[in-house]
Image (cartoon, grey):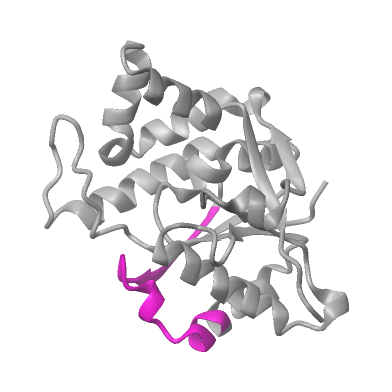
Amino acid sequence: MERHVLVVLPHPDDESFGAGGTIALHRQAGTPVTYLCGTLGQMGRNMGKPFFATRERLPDIRKSELEAACAVLDIQDLRFMGLRDKTVEFEDPEILANRILAVINEVNPTLIITQYPGFAVHPDHNAMGHATVLAVAKLPKESRPPVHCMAMARNRFDALGRPDVVVDITQTSKTKLNAIRAHRSQSEGLLQQFESGQDMAAKRRVEQFLQQEMFWLYPFED
């Protein structure tokens, strides 16, 4: 059992799609979870299906949806970094890392979950993952918590090998699905396709989300 888990990701929904089952398992075990979310996803293209969001209202909608998803996952410490969606890669990585380091020093996590820099597909994902490992690298080697990274790039298995941690989340799959559902503006179309059973690609994609979650242990060099 971990003492405290810190999740550092850039967007509302990253926590639910990527690590929702694992987060729920930690909460079931009584482990406190802090989610440090970089942006409000205000530049996202999904507006619900059928549309119910507008560009002007999207930040508030995404914030409310994230709060609802965190309630489903029982994350009791949700913090917003106030960054602009799709611009995290232009932030000074040292300043970003120092902000993350301040939270690490405060909550003293025994596990950090983030995205694997260079293998997380989206520039915001890569930038947030890079800042997180940069923050952890500032700690003395003996004080660093393990960093479990999500990797989504197609070449992840060739480049990184098999994942170091594979979590069976069947026990918490319903919780994860409900957390994904809470991100209505982003997930409604996908879940409609999944539940109709007519789009087999969407069905397989969601089923994969609900079976297991994979993480790679970040290899610090010193």
Q: Quadrant of residue 73?
A: top right
Task: Determine the residue located farthest toward the right in the rendered image.
Answer: 142
Q: Which residues are magenta?
A: 77-97
Q: Quadrant of residue 219?
A: bottom right
Residue in the image at 38% along x and 31% along y: 181
Q: Position of residue 209 (x, y in %)?
A: 53, 32
**Residue 94 shown in magenta:** yes
Point out residue 107 in the picture as x, y percentages from the top left corner.
68, 68
Q: Is residue 53 left or right of residue 216?
A: left
Q: In the image, what residue occupies the spot 78% across and 66% down?
A: 145
Query: Would residue 60 be counted in the magenta stretch?
Result: no
Q: Residue furthest top?
A: 197
In which image quadrant can residue 98 be found?
Answer: bottom right
Q: Residue at x 48, y 41 (%)?
A: 17
- Residue at 78 percent across and 78 percent down: it is 221
Q: Is residue 146 above or below residue 132?
A: above
Residue 25 vs residue 93, the one in the foreground: 93
